[in-house]
Structures are given as C-alpha cells and as structure tokens.
Image (cartoon, coloured by chain):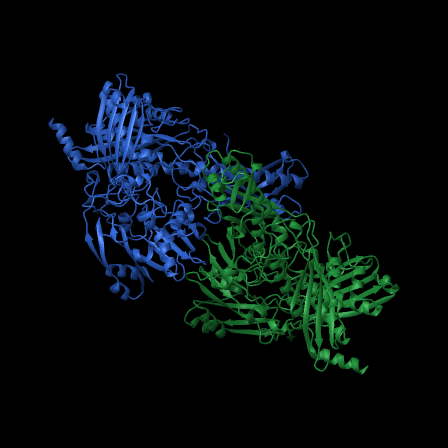
Chain colours: A green, B blue
Amino acid sequence: MTTTHLGKRRKIIDGLEKITGQAQYPADLNLPGLLHLRPVLSPYPHARIAGVEKEAALALPGVVAVLTGADLNGGRVAHSRSNMLLAGDEVKFAGQPVAVVVAETEAQAADGAALLDITYDPLDSVDDATAALDDAVLVWPDGMPRPDTSMASLHGGSASEEEQRAPSNLHQRQEFKRGDAGKALAQAHTVIERTFSTSRVHQSYLEPHAVVAQPGVKQGEVTVYTSTQGQYVVRSEVAGALGLQERDVHVVPLKVGGGFGAKYGLIDPLVAAVALKLRRPARLVLTRTEDMQTTTPMPEIEIRLRLGADAEGNLVGLDVNASIENGAFVSGHAGIIATMIGGMYRCENVSIVGTELLTNRPPVGAYRAPGVPQALFALESGMDELARTLGKDPLELRLQNAVQGGDLTGTGRPWPEIGLKACLERAQGHSLWKDRGQNANEGVGLAAGGWPGAFSPAGAVCRVDTDGTVRLHVGSVDISGVHSSMVLIAAETLNVHPDSVEIVQGTTDSGPYAPNSGGSQVTISLSGAVLDATQQVREQLLDLAAHHFETHKDDIELAGGHASLKGVPGKTIAIGELARMGQKLPGGPGPVVAEGRAAPKAGAPGFMAQLVKVRVDPDTGHVTPLEAVTVQDVGFALNPLLVEGQMHGGTAQALSIGLYEGQVFADGQLTNPNFMEYTFPRADDLPPLEAVLVEHPSEHGPFGARVVGEPPMTAGAAAIANAIYDAVGVRVTALPLKPEHLWKAIQDRRGT
Amino acid sequence: MTTTHLGKRRKIIDGLEKITGQAQYPADLNLPGLLHLRPVLSPYPHARIAGVEKEAALALPGVVAVLTGADLNGGRVAHSRSNMLLAGDEVKFAGQPVAVVVAETEAQAADGAALLDITYDPLDSVDDATAALDDAVLVWPDGMPRPDTSMASLHGGSASEEEQRAPSNLHQRQEFKRGDAGKALAQAHTVIERTFSTSRVHQSYLEPHAVVAQPGVKQGEVTVYTSTQGQYVVRSEVAGALGLQERDVHVVPLKVGGGFGAKYGLIDPLVAAVALKLRRPARLVLTRTEDMQTTTPMPEIEIRLRLGADAEGNLVGLDVNASIENGAFVSGHAGIIATMIGGMYRCENVSIVGTELLTNRPPVGAYRAPGVPQALFALESGMDELARTLGKDPLELRLQNAVQGGDLTGTGRPWPEIGLKACLERAQGHSLWKDRGQNANEGVGLAAGGWPGAFSPAGAVCRVDTDGTVRLHVGSVDISGVHSSMVLIAAETLNVHPDSVEIVQGTTDSGPYAPNSGGSQVTISLSGAVLDATQQVREQLLDLAAHHFETHKDDIELAGGHASLKGVPGKTIAIGELARMGQKLPGGPGPVVAEGRAAPKAGAPGFMAQLVKVRVDPDTGHVTPLEAVTVQDVGFALNPLLVEGQMHGGTAQALSIGLYEGQVFADGQLTNPNFMEYTFPRADDLPPLEAVLVEHPSEHGPFGARVVGEPPMTAGAAAIANAIYDAVGVRVTALPLKPEHLWKAIQDRRGT
C-alpha cells in the first residue's frame, strides 16, 4: 500500500498540552462553588457499622456535610463495585467507602474525615480463596445482589433461578470442553502437571480516580466530568446507581491519566450523588492510598495445569482449573482465560474449568488483557517445561503446535487469519534467541501471547471548515493515542497535512457513538467510521471543485489542502474555499460534512512472542532483566511510533507482573497500599525494550491493522519465569517473583 | 397536510430553565480566576487623547490592569464597530471605548474606572446628517478604514479605487432605477411629495452585551462564551480584530437575552484581547447606559418620497431619496430599503437613491428588518395620502397595486409566490377595518409590510440513543424559539413525542454548520437539514426493525417511540432497542445516526398587513393605541404558539417605533442613554395585540413555512401615522410621534 501519512512515524496530537501541563484532567476542573469530598474507608474486611458520630467533623470550619449510605443510597443496593455509593449497615471489605466528608476546600474535607468517628462491630470475614471455598463464612449470605435487585425485590420479589441456589462463596463455575482431556492425558507420552499462582496487581495509572459532578437544571439532572475509558458506561453506572434517567446524566470525558481497564465510573456515582444532594458542584480526587484500597486490581488466580503431548511433541490434552479470587463482587474473568489458555495451541482434547470465588476483599476488575497474563504464565511455563522434558527446542515446540486461522480458541470458536507463527518465526531469527546460553546464571526465556480483541460499531463526523481545517468529531476516549491515528486516516483520505486535522471530543450528548476504550478495540472499531466519513467528504470536495472548474470530478485531484484541475497549473482552489461554497451556494449540496458509520464483521486478533534475557544472582535470588524483545503482529502499523509506545508500555507492565508487583494482604487488610510499600519498577529497573513489528495483515482491521494495546502485556511474566529456568534451572510458579523463594529453590536444587 | 405534531401549539423547549433562572447567559458564567472588565467611554464625539493617567486606578486593591489601545490594538486599525477594540490617539464618537479597567471583582473594576483620568483635546465634530453633507469637518480625513487595511497598507500600500476618491462624509451613494420616474411623475394625474424622518432606535434587548473569554492552551488560542446571533461571525470578528487564526478561536454560544440584529460580536474582540493579554479568563457585561452609548442602534433615515398615480389609482412613478445617517462606520442599509420601498407595489418607473452618511456618532447596525420600518413609514404614509387625495379606499388602492409572484422588488428581482394580497384581503374582512370611523378623535390606520428573508445552506445531525432519546445536533443559535420548531419536525418525521427530542447546541468547533440567526432565515435554512437527517434516521430504524422481525421494511410502522409489525399486535420494539442493535450488531449498519444537509434554492418572503386603532386627545396631542391587528402570511405555522409570539413581539416593537422610541442627541452626545430617559413602552402602554395567521404556502419554505420574525416589525409605525390621520386629519412625518408636535399640528389645522 502506498501511503503519504499512514504508516509514518508521527508524534501524538495532544503531546504539547500534556507536557505543558495544560491538558485538563478532572483534578484541574475548578468550578465556582466547587465542594471537595474526602471518603472515609472501612478499616475492617467485614463489620457492622454501629454508629457514625458526625458532630466533631461538622463543627470544623468549611465542612458542609458528612454523608453516609443512609443519606445517599436511597434504599438501593449496589450490585457491583462501580455502582456502589456508601456502605449501608455493613461493610464487606476493607477499603469500602463508609462516609464522605464534604467541605469547601480539600484540606477541610481531609481534616473533617480525620475527625469522623465511626464505630464498627467486626464480623468474621473471608480473607482469601481457601477460606472462600470453606463456605464457613459467606460474603453474601442472601446471595450476591444483581442488577435488577432492589431492597423491595430482594425481600419480596420473585427469585431467579440463581438466587434459588444455596448461597455460596463459589459464585460461579464455567466449563469449556472439547474431546476428552482426561483420557488423552492418561494416554499421553509426556504430561506436565503444575499449579501456578499469581497476585493481585494494581493498574497504578499515574492519575488516581477523579471526578467532578455538577447538578443540572432539572431535578435529577447531573453533568459528570470524568477520567474514563467509556462515557456511556459511566452514564449507565451513574443513572443506575442513583435511579436517574439516562438522558438526564450528561458525561463529559476529560483527559485520562492512564486507565488500563480500571476507569469505568467507579467513584462517579458517589460524586454525582453528593452534587445532587447538596445542589453544588463536587469533586473527588482519590489519594494514591485510597485508590489502591478501594478500586479494582486484577485478581489473584490459581491455575492447576495439566499438559500432555505425544512423543513427537504434538499436544494431545489440556486440562485447566482456574480459581479466580474476585473479592466482594464478581468480575468474570473465566471466559477470556479459557479463550486464550485453550486457544494458543492446537489440541483436540481440552477441559477448562473456571471458578469465580467471593471474598471479603476489594472487588477486582479489568487490567490490560484481563486474565491473560495469569493464564499464559501457567500455559507458557508449562510449554517451556514440556519442551525441556521432551528435549525439544521451546520455540520449535510452539511453532509445531501454534494455532493459525481456522484453528479453535479455548471456547471453541475458529480464529480468523492470525500471525502467531509469523511472530515465533521472527523471534527465532532474533540474535537474542540465536545467541542464548553463553553466560552462566544468565538465561533467555520465550513465551507467546495474544489478545482476541473486541470490535463494535461506531460513528464519526468529518467537517471541513472555511479556513481549511478538517475536524473529526469522535465519541471515543483517547487513552493510547488512537485519535492520533484517526487524524492520519483523515489526512490520508483527503490528502491534507495532519496538522490541519483536529479532533473534536464527543460527550454522551453530542456523540458520535463509539465503544469504550477497552479490549484494544477503538482503532478497529472507529477507523471504518472515520474512513466512511472522510471518503464522503472527499467526494463532496471533488464535486464542488468540479462545479467550480466546470469539469468532471475525475479531472480533479486533492493535495495539500487544495483541489486542482489535473494537468492545468494554476487552476487550484483551497478546500476551505470549497467549504465556503458549500455554506453559501443556493440550491447546492450544503455544507461539506458527513457522518460515517461502520460495524466491523469480526475482530483483528493480535499475537506476539516475548523474549527476555535475565541474570540471576544465585547467592541472593535477585533477578536482573537485561533485555526484552517484543515481537508482535500488528497487522499494519498506522503510526509505528505510537504502536511501539504501546509495545514498550505493555512489555514493561508484563515484566513488572513477573518481577515486582503484587498486593499483599494480611487478615483481609491490604498491607502495601502506596508506592512506598507496593513494589513498582523504576525506569532503571527495566531492561532495554526492543519492539519488533510483524505486519501480517488482518482481513478485518483497517488497512490490515490489528489490536495493539493488550498483546504485549500477555507473555512477559511467563518469559521471565522461563528465562530464570534457562539461567538457573529453577521453575518459578508464583508471581511476583520473590528473591528469597528463588534463592531457597536454587539452594534446594544445588543440594539435590 | 395531516400532521401529528407540526402545526400544533407547543410551548418553547427551554422555557423551564429560563423561568427558573437556570439558563446560562454569559453573565452567569463564573470561571475560576475570572477577571472583570469596566470600559471607560469617550465623553466627546471627536477628540484627541492627550493622556491617560493610570496610577490612581492601579493603586486600588483588586485592580489588575488598566489597558488602552496602545496595549491591545497591536497596531491594527478597526474597520467596523464590531472589530474595534479601544481608541488609539483619537476618538470618533461619544461612547467609544478608550480604556478598560480590569479587576478581580466587578465593583473593583467600576471603582478603578471612576478613578481613571483621561485628558482629551476636543476637536470639531460632525454631529448630524446636515453637518455631514457640508464636508466642512471629515469623520475620516484619510478615508474610512477597510477590512484589508492595516497600519502598513494604510500608509504605504496600494490604494483601491474607492480610496482614491476624495474623502467625504458621503461615503456611498447607491441608485436603483427602472423606467423613467421623473417623466412619469411629471405626467401623473396625482403626485404625493413628502419628506419623512425617523430617529435612532436602540434594540433594547433585556440582556446587555455580555462576553466571557478564556485563553486557550496554545499562544493565541482563545475560547469565547458569548450571547450572539452567530458564532461564526464572532469567530471571524475576533480572529480578524486580533490577528489570530480562525481555528484557534473557539466560540461557544450561550443563551441570548434578546438580539434583534445587534449581537454579532461587538465587544467579543475586546474581551478576548484582554484574556489573551493577561492570560486569565475575563468577563465584560455592559451596563444599560454603556450598552446604549457604545452599541449599534438602527439609523436615522430621512426619506424624500414622490409617488404618482394615474386617475384610476394605478401607480405610475416612484422617486425616493433616502439619506442614512450611519455614525462613524457604514452599516449599509440602502439595498434593503430599496428592495422593499420599491417592491411593495407594481410600478414601471422607479428611482431610488440611497445615501450613506458618516458622522461622529456611534455606528449604527441592524435592528429587526433593518431599514424597512423607516422605508415603509414613508411609503405607507404616502400610499395613505395618495388614497385620500384620490378619494379611494386605502386598502382597495393597495390591493389594486400590490405585488404578487413575478412582480419586481425595488432592486429589480422578481418575487416568488407571495401573500401580500391575501393579507390585505384578510384585513379587509376584519371588523376593526370594517367598523372604523364610529367615534370622534378615533381612527384606524392600515399599512402593509414584509420582509424578503435570507436563506442559507445548513447541516444537522440526528441520533437515536439507547433510551429512545432523539438528539438533534444543530449549529444555529436559538433567539426566537426556532429550535422548538426543529424538535417538532423531528417528532413528526420519527413519530415520537416531542418531549423525547433534545437539542444539542453546536459550537464553532463541533458544528454542524448553520447560518446566523438573522434575516429570519434559520427556520427556512435549517429545516431542510433536520428533515434530511431525521428521514435518514427513520429509514435506518425501519431497516433495523425489519431485520429484527425478519420482514420487509414496508411492513414496519413507527409510532410513539416504537417500531411495530403492522397488523400484528405485540410485535413491537422500542426505537432505543433498535439504536442498541445498531451499536452492537457485528457487520451491521452501525449506530443510528445521520447528518443531514440542505441548501434552499430561494427564500420564502413574508408579507403582512397592519391595522391599528388609536384615540387622539386633541387638547394634549397624546395618542392612545387601542387595538392592533397583525395579519401575516406565515405560509405554514410550524408552531402557531411561537409564530404568534413573534407577531406580538414584532408588532409591539413596530408600534413603539411609531409612538415612543428615539435616541436624542445634542452636540454629538446621547442625552437619553438609559431606561429612565429613553421612552420605552410598558406593557400597559401597548394595546391588545391580535395575530391573524394567513397560510399562503411558500414553494421554498419547509412545509410551506415563510419567514416570520421580521415582517411584523415593518408596518406598525406607518399604521400608527395613518390612524392618527384617520382620527384627526393630521399627517405625522417624523418618528417617534411627539405629542407637542401633534398638538401644534392639530391646532394649526383647526386654525385653517
């Protein structure tokens, strides 16, 4: 494909406003009469609230109100973390908001919160997955609330089938089966059986959750300014949690300081409720500690894996039991875990069971490629072990079994054309892989990964203004530079300089409709609409120019913001002038503008291969990552600079899951809720990151492009584990790596 | 036409927010860090500025800056009132802004302005039209600045043809001729010759000019929140006056508390310049006195009229000389005056000369049907006198000569199909006309009027949301309830309740493009785009429902926000669900949305006839209006309630021009710049107003609708004059009526 702007490296469009501090995040939005909120979080994982003594806080200058669930919840019961306001009579997890102090300044709100005296009667709690399985204590003795459950229906209404089951902390069990995995494993030449565990990892975006809400003109009308990945989800959450009409909730997405799956209206209902209650604008910006205590990290997952192969190394059986610790509400990771853990390698006999467990911990949520880093930590560690047991090259073994177009995912659907093999082949030729094994205590690990990718219909509007500015009006939220790519599509279609293309950010009122910025879907979903809109506008400009030059549109060409009569120098008119003609011509076509719509038929899955080189200090168990190479099939890189940025970021987070990050709980309490105690890599803790772009085009993605954001997150942890094995022959089965455990294992191995 | 919602009386959509005080006007917009401006206006009509002593003002607490033209103008010379910032070395009219005091509060700014010490050297001034014609003193000795004129080109660039003419206060003279008016009048059976004069009348909207400007992210980028009739004009004015790129000027139109032709960015450049200079948001809300002193009322016009008819009463000649006093810049009323004064009655010999004069007074501007009330005061008084001289019924004489489709306007273009005769015929049957002449000193006056109406291309977006809300995204500004009519068009097309249709107001960035809300053009211009968008959306909904019910779209009907399978009870789906399908269906049509475009081929002129009954007290000259009937061809009343509102408002302002309003100058000074001294009718000064709707459909207007806002303004003053003649036999030739003059004329007549 010959392109002028697409496929070229170009800086992100809102870089200037971001680096100069002028981009507006919710914490920057200072409305007249703005009130400030400070939440008070439960210190107990499970307790009855015996009393809230408000007087001391209310006596403080500037404190406007102290509100509890009795003031705000309106008798509604939360059915998810997102639509939770404040606790009622009981708290279900340490970190649950119990009250909120509202004051004229942030400092006054904080002082008020410190003076708030809440009496708790602690109750027995379910502190981890093991305790959950006991069912000795139930997180939800009456069953977990459901979206249609109000106080009234909970006690008097008809119970659904699920509610009629005996309440249990084992909320749900999902099975995905094909063939007979048990029999196949019993007959296999070689079987690997291991149990892998992972930790809760927090998304740790730079910007904590932050929301401003402003009451509207009508009773029950509210505008929410928020840092979100999806304004329509926020609208639904706020309307649902507060019992408002969706049309009365106006959501304006501001800049997002990192989302990674976590920003879908978590504290928005609470802030909106306060604004409506007090009839004043209100703002809540969580502190880092509050953010880690009360928001939704990725779940702890324990995976028991059995993997069987015949003597030639062909996979014959896969048996997976994934136990997912969800906290107080279920997030639902089983499906995507099954899709990927059973969808990387061809295998006729597969059994995958996912178990969703409830505990008295903060509810979990999505984090970049949710569930897949944990799933592939197990699978790719297992594949490594299988190769070594069979005496095969780990990369060759993967190539031999890797899925391709038409093979099945773990839930039994066929993959479209994909590039897993292409990535493995490219990794095979990389010097890091070819030259491995030269130094003692150093090792190179390989793991493969991928992400199926969501896709949704979307709209987009393209307008040309009289000064030649091309405006793209989009409803998507830009969390990863996607709008910068949309600008290139418009520039390419209209043959204008990208600097003359501007993005107009939509709200829930102004549209256009676009899906959430999650599941790596925005580029796939939005490009078609942008292309549709800009192609219509292109035709409109050609028609107007043909009218102007009294010729046929085939004789017109667009370049550099002008329309010209082909082959006739000087016969040229600026597209802004054509736009002006459209705005003036009586009986003409009307203004130059088009709304594009598109609905992709299928997704554009992205696969990748991760190479990591580490050095292990056998005397301390310390692991130093030395190099990381991410080989990723991006289909077609609309803007290679930004694609590499996604690959670097995803790889960094993936390595961090392997080496550093994990929330630590004791008796239901998060013990490391801040960046002093929560281990997080500094820039110099990470190795040089190399991004190798494979362009194996997707039939469904725009210009062949594939999902980009999530794949590089999926294999890094497993690659680290495999590199450690390559270095010192010790198998890591728990994340994050703990040097003391590794040291012990190295000592044990030396001893044997 | 059978309609469900169109043509039905329905309240204005933003009535609730307006009557509850929640509608947001610029004066309500309180941004953090907002600065307040107080302008200091010249007390002299012409003076050199000898010095500005800032120290005392700057010493006041809260005063941030005192700025003059030297600080803000950047060497640019204003070429119109709208793009004027502050005076340079010289002031050209009393009321011209010379300096601005900027402070943290409005009170501090006012205190600072009171302390500002400006020294003027008064110069000879041109105080009225008579003085202007002398050319003894020139308002612009070097010629009036023009749009492309900068300091540099003014002194060194090439001069255009006009600049090469000798400078004169007679800025421009326009002639419109057909036939030989002089000869025809010399040969006519009866000739009426009179000179009529009118006064400057101020638009006197409830909300004075008000603007908030906020500096943007980039250097030279600014957002302007304003009360305007056209955001694109404001953008051009601000960009032009400040030398900015248009794409860097973002204009957000807020609610408008009355415009009437006057709100097109008059003080916006000044406020934007201050915000950019001080890098803080800034607000200026003019006081009533400032508003009357420094903004743009309608001009004083003197019209010498000669009107000739043959013995049968057929018009044979019309000779008009209109002298328009413009103030310091030319506004350009001659063309529209000619269009209407020469376009009401068939006449083969017409000569119209319009003369635009410059004086040292505030520049004039547009006011509802600009120039036409003055023009028709002359023409319709003349027609009345002609009828009486010929002994003919004034209504019959008009009917006999009235233009119809194909007859010419005063500038020689043919009218499309129009309803002037239909209005006269309806007036003829009204009891007020039929029963006139019963009481001494009471009289009934008739005058006819009309407005050709502008028209422009426009766009509009229609979206259906998942809750069934239909959103119309429009770029027009609602100054007269036009958006309420757009809601009805959408409701009619989609067969939904009007309450489920919401308007999303566009900005210069978000679009859609729409013309200014002036010239009564918005309904005519926008309806086509709204209809186009909603019809496309209707088809999309039918397609989705057909897909859902697995049938053909012809079998689907839309009603009450649902799509149903015709004749199959229970087979129904909400349009919100169809919208959800559009947002979800892989490979489907995409979200339910369409951008409509339309460009009317021609306008839809609206004519009318005005009947007014008055009682005259011959002992005092006091005139009491007793009844007013406005018979207006509206083509088709999209919403009769709002059409009547326009007719009432226009009639009230027209009667007020006749009876009460006029700015009074002495030595170039406005002597009545406030509502204590400027005569303005109270509600009980006005008679009962009856609106009679004639529906003579336009071929170009939507559903036959015609321009509505301006016609009722055009004939009231003349009707008052004719009623006075009918009552006491005295001809009023100067507006507004002055009881002392009328008393004198009555005494003189008694004496004769």
Q: How many labels does the image show?
A: 0
Q: In this view, does A184 lie to the left or right of A230?
A: right
Q: Where is residue B37 in the image (x, y as percent from the top left)?
A: 32, 57
Q: Which residue lies furthest to the top in this view?
A: B311
Image quadrant of residue A301?
bottom right
> B414 or B142: which is nearer to us?
B142
Instruction: Please say if A421 is above or below B529.
Output: below
Instruction: Please say if A135 is above or below A414.
Output: below
Q: Where is residue A95 in the image (x, y as percent from the top left)?
A: 58, 70
Q: Position of residue A418 (x, y in %)?
A: 73, 54
> B219 or B165: which is nearer to us?
B165
Q: Where is residue B712 in the image (x, y as percent from the top left)?
A: 34, 34
Q: In the image, what residue occupies the spot 27% across and 32% down?
A: B377
Q: In this view, does A421 lie to the left or right of B111?
A: right
Q: In the image, what residue occupies the spot 56% across and 37% down?
A: A555
Instruction: Please say if A293 is above or below A550.
Output: below
> In the rendered image, which quarter contains the C terminus of chain A?
bottom right
Q: Does residue B4 appear in the picture of this structure?
A: no
Instruction: Please say if A147 is above or below A294.
Output: above
Image quadrant of residue B59?
bottom left
Q: Is residue B179 left or right of residue B498?
A: left
Q: Does residue A435 appear in the picture of this structure?
A: yes
